[in-house]
């Protein structure tokens, strides 16, 4: 698939969570298309700064107007086996190696991606790219909405961990549930071991996934 004028934006969701998969998305809009101009009342920016209702509305527009949207997932087993650094690099490299041949690929973060082959000159890793590039902000939204839905579905089977609201991140309540119930098959064992080795948080402290 050739799209020489497109710029693809890439971002991930779930890097710091104690449970659940890592999800990344790649989004490209048609040349000269601006989602922010078409929908000025909807703040398309970093997905963590949007409400769930705003994200749901935004992702609907993204899928409707984007030239290209794709999602990649790295399993909990692979994260435990290879580490989150490997997972973060591999998930973006897998997306970049999709058949789409774009002019540029902009990845959120300060990563050293190596497995890029001929596409390497077209790839840039930019800190806070989601605040500078609309396609990256859109990818952030797509990845987060996808991962949030995965965690909400898992919550139906493991309700005591509170994944419907903490999305697998290490809130005080989530850590307390781990101490009481132990690990589920969807917990990242290395992450949990590190989190539980720290002193318990003070009651009432609840940093959810949007501030982690």
Image (cartoon, rainbow, N blue to C red):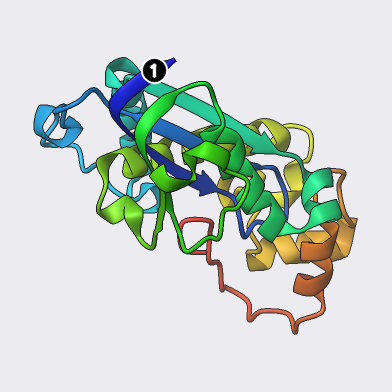
| Residue appearing at x 71%, y 45% in the figure | 20
- Tell me: residue 28, above or below residue 83: above
- Tell me: residue 15, above or below residue 23: below
Question: Where residue 74 sits: x, y (%)?
Answer: 70, 40
Q: Residue 80: which quarter of the image?
A: bottom right
| Residue appearing at x 44%, y 15% in the figure | 1
Task: Report the residue marked by disc 1.
Answer: 2
Q: Secondary structure at mark 1?
A: strand
Question: Where residue 16 sits: x, y (%)?
Answer: 62, 60
Question: Where residue 131 sits: x, y (%)?
Answer: 27, 55
In this rendering, position of residue 212 left or right of residue 158 = left
In this rendering, position of residue 196 left or right of residue 49 = right
In this rendering, position of residue 139 left or right of residue 150 = left
| Residue appearing at x 76%, y 81% in the figure | 198
As drawn, the residue found furthest toward the bottom would be 199
As drawn, the residue found furthest toward the front would be 118
Question: Where residue 157 sits: x, y (%)?
Answer: 78, 33
How many numbered discs sit on the rendered protein?
Answer: 1
Label 1, residues with CA under 10 Å away: few <14, some 14-19, many ≥20: few
Residue 55 visible in this rendered orientation of the protein: yes
Q: Residue 139: which quarter of the image?
A: top left
41 or 116: nearer the eye?
Answer: 116
- Tell me: residue 31, above or below residue 144: above
Residue 24 visible in this rendered orientation of the protein: no
14 or 101: nearer the eye?
Answer: 101
- Tell me: residue 12, above or below residue 37: below
Q: Residue 200: which quarter of the image?
A: bottom right
| Residue appearing at x 75%, y 72% in the figure | 195
């Amino acid at each position: 698939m050739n799209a020489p004028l497109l710029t693809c934006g890439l971002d991930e969701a779930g890097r710091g969570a104690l449970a659940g998969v890592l999800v990344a998305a790649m989004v490209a809009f048609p040349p000269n298309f601006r989602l922010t101009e078409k929908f000025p009342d909807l703040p398309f920016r970093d997905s963590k700064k949007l409400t769930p209702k705003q994200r749901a509305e935004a992702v609907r527009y993204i899928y409707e107007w984007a030239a290209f949207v794709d999602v990649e997932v790295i399993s909990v087993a692979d994260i435990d086996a290879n580490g989150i650094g490997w997972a973060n690099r591999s998930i973006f490299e897998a997306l970049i190696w999709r058949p789409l041949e774009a002019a540029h690929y902009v990845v959120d973060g300060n990563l050293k991606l190596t497995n890029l082959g001929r596409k390497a000159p077209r790839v840039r890793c930019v800190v806070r790219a989601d605040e500078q590039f609309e396609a990256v902000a859109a990818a952030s939204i797509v990845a987060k909405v996808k991962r949030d839905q995965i965690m909400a579905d898992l919550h139906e089977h493991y309700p005591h961990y509170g994944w419907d609201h903490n999305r697998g991140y290490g809130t005080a309540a989530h850590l307390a549930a781990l101490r009481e119930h132990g690990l589920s098959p969807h917990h990242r064992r290395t992450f949990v071991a590190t989190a539980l080795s720290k002193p318990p948080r003070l009651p009432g402290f609840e940093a959810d996934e949007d501030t982690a």
